[in-house]
Image: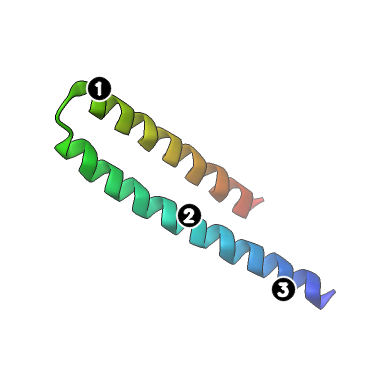
Amino acid sequence: MEWMLLEIANTEREMSAQIERLELRVRETRRKVEHAHTPADKRVLNKQLGELHDEIEFLRRKLRA
């Protein structure tokens, strides 16, 4: 039973770490959007931002479950 709790805790830590990495990517991508030269570049970067936000929200929901 104890190993199950450890496994759950490890999984939660891994998901939290993944969320933090994704949040860093969001910040980096936002900076890129600010410096993008063309509307097409901004469009692609904004799409990436949306995908990153979706992935973060998915992981947060899994953590709450």
Residue on which the image places disc 2? 19
Location of residue 17 in the rendering, given as x and y in whole percent from the top left corner? 50, 62
Q: Kindly state the secondary structure of the residue where label 1 is placed.
A: helix
* Label 1 packing within 10 angstroms: few (<14), some (14-19), many (20+): few
Label 3 vs 2, first from the N-terminus? 3
- Residue drawn at point x = 63 percent, y = 49 percent: 62
Q: Disc 3 or 1, which lies upstream in sequence?
A: 3
Q: Residue at x 58, y 62 (%)?
A: 14
Point out which mark residue 6 bears.
3
For label 2, the SS is helix
Query: Relative to 65, does residue 38 appear above or below in the rendering?
Result: above
Question: Which tag, 2 or 1, sits closer to the chain's start?
Answer: 2
Left of 10 or right of it: where is 4? Answer: right
Estimate the x, y position of residue 45 in percent, counting from the top left.
31, 33
Decide which of 4, 40 is in the foreground and name it: 40
Q: CA distance from mark 3 to mark 1?
A: 46 Å
Q: Nearer the viewer, mark 3 or mark 1?
A: 1
The answer to which quarter of the image holds residue 42 is top left
- 24 up-or-down from 39: above or below: below
Instruction: Name the element at disc 3.
Output: helix
* Kind of residue at disc 3: Leu
- Which mark identifies residue 40? 1
Whether residues under marks 2 and 1 lie with C-beta atoms below 8 angstroms apart, the answer is no
Picture quarter with the N terminus: bottom right
